[in-house]
Image (spheres, coloured by chain):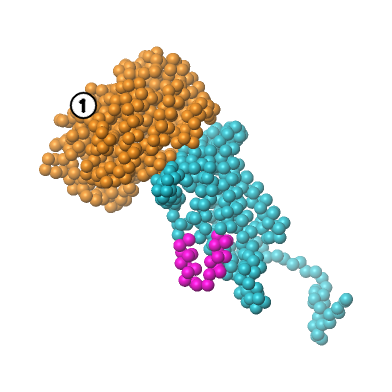
Amino acid sequence: MTVEHTLPAGQRTRAEEAPTEPAAVRRPSLRRRILKEKWTYLFLLPGVLYFVVFHYVPLLGNVVAFQDFSPFRGIFGSDWVGLENFRTIVRDPEVMRALTNTLIIAFLQIVFAFPAPIILALFLNSLVSDRVKRSIQTIVYLPHFISWVVVVSIWQKILGGAGLVSEILERVGVEGVNIMANPDTFKILVTSQVIWKDVGWGTIIFFAAIVAIPSELYESAATDGASSWRRMWHITLPGMMPVISMLLILNVGTALTVGFEQMLLQQPAVGADAAQVLDTFVYFRGIAGGDWGVATAAGLIKGVIATILVLSANKIAKKLGGEGVI
Amino acid sequence: MEQRRSTGQHRPGGPTRRQAIGLAGTSIAAAAVLGGCGSSSGGSGSGSSGELTVPVTHEAESVEGLILSDVEGVAPLYVGSPTEYRDVVTDKPAAGGSISSFQILWGAPVTGRDKNQVWQKLEEELGVDSFDITMVPDASYGDKLATLLASGNLPDFVYVQPTDPNAARALSDGAFLELNDYLEGEKVEDYPNIATTPEVTWQDSARDGALLGVPNPDPLRNNLMVLRLDAMKEVGADAVPEDAEDLKTLWLELAKLGKVGGREVFAHGALEPTTFEPLHDLGQEFQIVDGKVTHKYLLPQYEDHLAYMAELWKGGFFHPDALGQVDPELFKQGQQLNYEASFAGFYWVPDAGRVNLCREAVPTAEFIHYAMPSVEGGVGRHALGKSYGGMVCIPADRGKDEDRVRELLRICDYYRSPFGSEEALFLNSGIEGRQFDFDAEKNLVPAENPPTEGACTWLGLLQNRVNQLPDMNRDMLDNIKETLEAATESGEVSLVDGLVSEVQIRNDSKLEEVHKDYYNAIVSGRRPVSDVAELQKAWLDRGGQDVLDDFQKLVDEAS
């Protein structure tokens, strides 16, 4: 069907308004455009400077991966060794062990630690009493502010060989239980610690996402007789999905960073078989061993893997109908 | 950097000292070979010839009441405090200007310079207008030093622990000034306190004949074992067994006690491998057996040692969390019955020594020090330490100004002021009336809640060690002296100490991690003792063999 558009009398079409000869439309110069938006650029400047100075310029330091680096001689004075540091890594069985442990722990954290704050946020959102809600929020936020040294000490006092659980079990005749020194359950232990420490803090962003969902949707659903479960499933969760998708992609990008301090503190008790991860490997070789070239090469490999993971997760998110972050 | 070699046939006091303290399991020939790595005090001393003349050594003026030991390498003892202190540095070392240092901070951070009276007095004593002191905690020394080196802006004094990989690399890279032209032979007499440094300390700290810093002398052994005698009496023992098997029986009996002096107790705290190694005469980390360099983990008795340790674990001798984090202060809280610490750890000033703190927590506590016995009978073979604990280096670029170097060395000389001097009293204890006081008998009494100012005086250069025993612990004197002497006499120094293997330095932390991983698993029963073969293979495959080969090459070259 064709619709004819007519103009009110006295009005002309754009074509009629257009000059008969095309005049050269000059774009304002870059300087003029910058001056026009000067306040925007001024506000951008600190952020851009921060990223350039503290994130992009230091990237140049990755050349150390191709050197027999000496801190005193510096990048310009150290010898170039080509790919030797990468060969050392490939030949080192410790790297494969560290990579395997890292991937297992990363997987556990994404499967269990990532959804935990979503579930908690949904649970807290369903609470009617604001007072109870705020009290629970305060309590679950607290562990986030405790350092890993203290967290591990607290867990040891409860689950260690001389801890509360062990003492209780001893009284009922079960001796020698030391959950903190059991390599078989170590990966579950560290995932539990991460959940305990950060579940509250993680709810902040999800709460913000829930608040952004229009209340009319809930009112309409309630009018139509939707139960609270239905409302959560069909309104809250889909409303949170863009944030969940974005955070999941970002988490995948940092998945190979699985808690350096947490691992370093607990490694002696369970052994490297269970607790050696890429970050502790880099520490032992780079900082403690002074082998900066090998440590940087390992860090570079980790960065490349993380980039591939982010790009893959982004692509998957887009295929599943999400927006992705890139 | 010019490479120097010594001309001497052997180190004065080198093999002789070693032979005197008994080199079980090593060949005399190897000792002679390695002795050649050192130098002779009769060498040419010419800087241009690339040879080292060891700086001469003068005995420090003795203090009345100093108890000297007949056993070489044992620090003198002194009970209480000297009644008089003498001035040993009459002229100010510097004539104004500013100096800077990078040093370790022991304990809590100190008050800033503007409000720190000790810091200000130190500047006054040294004769400088300002002293910029960078203090880093011991735990982060390695990474802070790496950052400092990478900055290219080194302070006048850098405290160097040669076992740190970054420090070792910097020494090899020529970061620090070669001090031979200032300190060799009799030149050291310009700095009379530095001249009290023992010859062996100079020899051990020199690299390829180059004196790259002023070393801080250390006794060969200053660690002591202690048992709670009151707990021993509860299980019917009043003396420490002289046999390792009997000692194990005693330890396991103590493990069953549960409570002593009204407190929950553990027989032993953290699992620290080196503490127990004398039981099976494991000795030094690297050893020469029949001319070949080997490692203590590769010795035939190592499996027996692990079996012994596994039995202790099974018997509940160790704290249940001994593999992880154990409160390091269990002993001073009266909750640990068997313990190892340095002399200073046990008897530092009266209010901070762990023996007195333990007695405060458990008034009925009694103590007995002992040297670890061997399964073969007698005292076990102890691994003696180096004759120095780090050194203070001056950056190479300061060498352009000889007067400046001499001024910096005069400052080092001030820091090395001997026991019994006003200078050492200030450096060690702070300011009278602020950090300490004297009682009626002229004993030094620490002030209550003193301002945290004193740690800035720790540059890393101390007086020749004197173990100062608080008067209230006088009853322990003989026990301490006998224990230190027995452990030192039965000990051995490292035959590869004079050799610098960068392969070893680079692999050290990795190999230690490999060992600790297997060791913890075997001792705690997660792995069978027979896995010792797997441990040894993993250690060799992961870099241990490269280290042994490198040391072997160095030994062969030295011969």
- Of all residues shown, which one is farthest toward the right? A1
Q: In the drawing, does residue B471 fall left or right of residue B164? A: left
Whether residue B12 can be seen here: no
Quadrant of the image occupied by residue B495:
top left
The image quarter in which residue B476 lies: top left
Which residue position is annotated with label 1? Answer: B68
Which residue range is magenta in the image?
A117-141
Q: Residue furthest bottom?
A: A9
Q: Position of residue B194 (x, y in %)?
A: 28, 30
Q: Chain of mark 1?
A: B
Would you say residue A86 is visible in this rendering? yes
Q: Is residue A133 magenta?
A: yes
Chain assigned orange: B
**Residue B221 versus residue B268: which sits nearer the camera?**
B268
Magenta stretch secondary structure, dominant:
helix
Where is residue B504 shown, x and y percent of the image? 47, 28
Please identify the quadrant where the C terminus of chain A is shown. Answer: bottom right
For the N terminus of chain A, the quadrant is bottom right
Tell me what residue is drawn at x 36 percent, y 39 percent: B269
